[in-house]
Image (cartoon, helix red, strand yellow):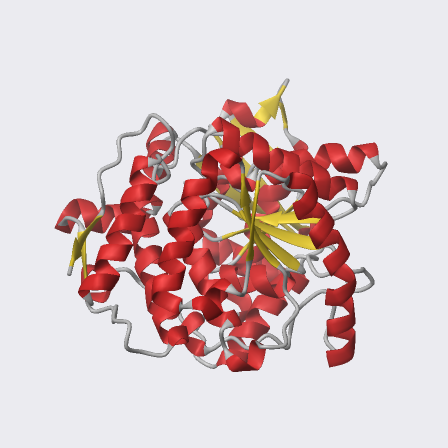
């Protein structure tokens, strides 16, 4: 089966040089990345968090770029039939395929080398969001970033939808990691809230990266998709576009996001920042937040706890607080001369920007001791949880675990006991893998 697609969005108009560059990318080592990202987008709604399940199921899938003087077309060979309705590709999936090309083309064209300087990395994040049309210049603060696990139970999922609904009623927009679970729920709820208020300028922004997109394919609600090069740039994109952040129950990935955020907010230069953060879930999830808060207090102290608020089982209160906080965010940005659409004044150290590659050696050498600056400890803890995420769902992590066995994490005994307790709670609560999947830990804790 062969299907040809016309370009959408910024790819409607390409120079011949850009067409040539795309063709080169499709025949180079980037082809695998390109093909796998497109295949992930075509598998919207798939119920797996193992990338290879998708790749193995569609081994006969191929994608080719067909060059024309006026631009390009895409030719799909044996694409998943779930992406089509009566022989026509779903419009949202069509758009997302060209988002993949847009972002990979942009990275290839402008950012071939690994960036080292902090300002250059932040500019890259800004540049990619701007190129994708994700930065709205003449808009009031309204973007609520929602973090949480891809593997949550039905009670928690319904709660994320209810929170999204309340946010939608108040005209607030949603940004998530674009996958299932707590990434889909707020968007789905917000669609109803927006519809009730006849809000047609609704935004459901999904930020992802190549190593996670197949394990967490974009959910059907996402109407803006941006693919950042790696997790570090994805996290920076989240917090620089956010006007507030909600954290729902999740696993290692959610802990990574919270540690990243707290490490940045604890920087002295960010003391005045106005970025509301609320951790919330149903009554059923109260123990989850208690465990998480104990770990944060033990590792990063009371100062870190003061950077967020926990609200249990009250979607309306969460949305009311964030709606009322938007005026404070607006006034802060205005007083600092900062943009409403991108938080330039937020200080992010280089430790939080440089990609961390979770090899066994890198994981074993992490400095996991309490006797270090809190920001540095947060950065190292973030790397540890990032490695566990890779070992759970990312291709490169799964491959090295299969070849060399679990990662070994070691450090200060009290800290390692606390980490082991938190991770075991995630395992016991079924937060490491999708429901019904047997979880085999990709890590060992050594005090």
Q: Position of residue 103 (x, y in %)?
A: 56, 56
Observer-nearest residue: 311 or 11?
Answer: 311
Q: Identify the residue at image location x=35%, y=65%.
A: 299
Q: Identify the residue at image location x=34%, y=50%.
A: 389
Q: Is residue 30 above or below residue 298?
A: above
Which quadrant: the C terminus?
Answer: bottom left
Q: Position of residue 390 (x, y in %)?
A: 32, 51
Q: Identify the residue at image location x=33%, y=68%.
A: 380
Q: Is residue 118 visible?
A: yes
Q: Position of residue 291 (x, y in %)?
A: 38, 49
In the shown orientation, is residue 115 left or right of residue 14?
left
Q: Identify the residue at image location x=75%, y=66%.
A: 328
**In this view, which residue lies farthest toward the right?**
198
Q: Is residue 108 above or below residue 225?
A: below
Q: Is residue 391 visible?
A: no
Q: Is residue 104 above or below residue 177?
A: below
In the shown orientation, is residue 376 left or right of residue 2?
left
In the shown orientation, is residue 445 left or right of residue 81?
left
- Total number of numbered labels? 0
Q: Position of residue 357 (x, y in %)?
A: 31, 63
Observer-nearest residue: 211 or 138?
Answer: 138
Residue 168, image quadrant:
top right
């Amino acid at each position: 089966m062969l299907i040809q697609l016309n370009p959408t969005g910024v790819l409607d108009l390409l120079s011949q040089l850009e067409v040539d560059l795309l063709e080169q990318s499709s025949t180079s080592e980037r082809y695998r990345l390109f093909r796998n990202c497109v295949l992930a987008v075509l598998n919207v709604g798939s119920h797996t968090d193992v990338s290879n399940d998708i790749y193995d199921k569609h081994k006969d899938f191929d994608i080719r770029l067909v060059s024309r003087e006026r631009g390009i077309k895409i030719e799909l060979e044996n694409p998943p039939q779930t992406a089509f309705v009566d022989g026509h590709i779903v419009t949202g999936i069509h758009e997302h395929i060209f988002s993949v090309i847009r972002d990979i083309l942009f990275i290839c064209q402008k950012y071939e080398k690994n960036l080292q300087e902090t300002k250059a990395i932040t500019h890259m994040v800004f540049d990619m969001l701007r190129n994708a049309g994700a930065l709205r210049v003449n808009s009031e603060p309204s973007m609520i970033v929602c973090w949480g696990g891809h593997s949550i139970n039905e009670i928690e999922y319904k709660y994320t939808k209810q929170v999204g609904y309340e946010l939608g009623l108040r005209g607030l927009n949603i940004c998530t990691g674009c996958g299932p679970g707590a990434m889909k729920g707020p968007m789905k709820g917000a669609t109803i809230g927006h519809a009730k208020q006849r809000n047609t300028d609704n935004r459901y922004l999904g930020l992802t990266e190549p190593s996670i997109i197949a394990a967490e394919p974009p959910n059907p609600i996402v109407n803006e998709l941006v693919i950042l090069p790696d997790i570090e740039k994805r996290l920076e994109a989240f917090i620089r576009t956010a006007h507030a952040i909600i954290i729902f129950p999740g696993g290692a990935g959610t802990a990574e996001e919270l540690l990243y955020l707290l490490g940045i907010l604890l920087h002295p230069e960010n003391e005045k920042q106005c970025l509301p953060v609320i951790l919330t879930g149903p009554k059923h999830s109260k123990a989850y937040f208690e465990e998480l808060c104990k770990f944060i207090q033990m590792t990063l102290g009371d100062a870190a706890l003061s950077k967020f608020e926990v609200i249990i089982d009250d979607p309306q209160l969460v949305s009311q607080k964030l709606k009322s906080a938007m005026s404070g965010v607006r006034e802060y940005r205005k007083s600092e001369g900062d943009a409403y659409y991108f938080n330039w004044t937020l200080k992010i150290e280089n430790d939080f920007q440089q990609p961390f590659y979770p090899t066994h050696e890198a994981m074993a050498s992490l400095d996991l001791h309490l006797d270090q600056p809190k920001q540095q400890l947060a950065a190292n803890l973030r790397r540890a949880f990032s490695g566990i995420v890779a070992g759970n769902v990312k291709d490169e992590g799964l491959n090295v675990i299969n070849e060399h066995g679990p990662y070994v994490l070691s450090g200060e005994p009290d800290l390692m006991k606390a980490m082991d307790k938190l991770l075991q709670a995630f395992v016991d609560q079924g937060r490491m893998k999708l429901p019904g999947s047997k979880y085999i830990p990709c890590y060992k804790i050594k005090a």
